[in-house]
């Protein structure tokens, strides 16, 4: 799995199919900055080329492509979640305790 952006995209698509703009907006809610089209669309293309997602044009707006996880993408997402938990799980738990102690945790 290449990078945190890839994981975030798979995370969002594991919840519901979305177009690129919707994915970028969801990522912005989580991290505070919205990925640019020059960042998000190459990542989507890479995931599509690797068979982890598929895209289909929306019926009501043929310019919009809605992405969803493939079966391989669902498996890749679970593997990525396992990896991120293994690598960062304890750090996230400790960071939450630190932030809660200073009163800045949402």
Image (spheres, rainbow, N blue to C red):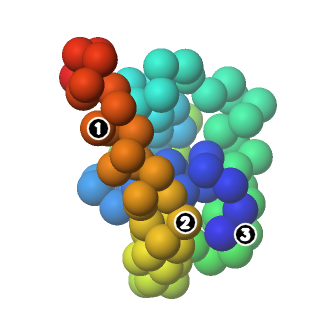
Q: What residue lies at 61% left-to-right and 47% top-to-bottom?
A: 5
Residue 16 can be seen in this image: yes
| Left or right: 80 in relation to 13 | right
CA–CA distance between discs 3 and 1?
40 Å
Give the CA separation, mark 2 to mark 3: 26 Å
Query: Residue 59's spot in the image, x, y percent?
Result: 37, 46
Position of 39 compared to 86: left or right?
right
Report if the CB atoms under discs 3 and 1 are less than 8 Å apart.
no
Whole-percent x, y for residue 46 in the image: 73, 60
According to the picture, the residue beneath numbered tag 2 turns out to be 87
Asked if marks 2 and 3 touch (Cβ < 8 Å), the reply is no
Of residues 10 and 90, the one nearer the viewer is 90
Name the mark on residue 51: none
Which residue is pictured at 67% across the width and 25% down the height?
Answer: 36
Q: Is residue 5 above or below residue 76?
A: above
**In what element is the residue under mark 2?**
helix
Which structural element holds mark 3? helix
Q: Position of residue 64 (x, y in %)?
A: 50, 38
Task: Specify few, some or many for label 2: CA neighbours under 10 Å numbering under 14, 14-19, or 20 or more.
Answer: few
Q: Are marks 1 and 2 in contact (CB under 8 Å)?
A: no
Which quadrant of the rendered structure holds the N terminus?
A: bottom right
- Count of marks placed on residues: 3
Cα–Cα gap, marks 1 and 2: 18 Å
Q: Nearer the viewer, mark 3 or mark 1?
A: 1
Of pointers 1 and 2, the one earlier in the residue sequence = 2
The residue that disc 3 covers is 49
In the rendered image, residue 8, in percent from the top left (x then y), is placed at: 50, 49
Determine which residue is flagged by label 1.
Answer: 97
């Amino acid at each position: 799995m290449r990078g945190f952006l890839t994981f975030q995209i798979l995370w969002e698509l594991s919840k519901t199919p979305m177009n690129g703009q919707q994915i970028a907006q969801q990522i912005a809610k989580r991290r505070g900055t919205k990925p640019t089209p020059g960042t998000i669309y190459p990542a989507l293309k890479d995931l599509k080329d690797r068979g982890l997602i598929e895209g289909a044009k929306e019926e009501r707006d043929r310019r919009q492509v809605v992405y969803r996880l493939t079966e391989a993408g669902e498996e890749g997402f679970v593997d990525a979640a396992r990896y991120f938990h293994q690598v960062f799980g304890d750090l996230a738990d400790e960071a939450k305790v630190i932030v809660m102690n200073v009163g800045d945790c949402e």
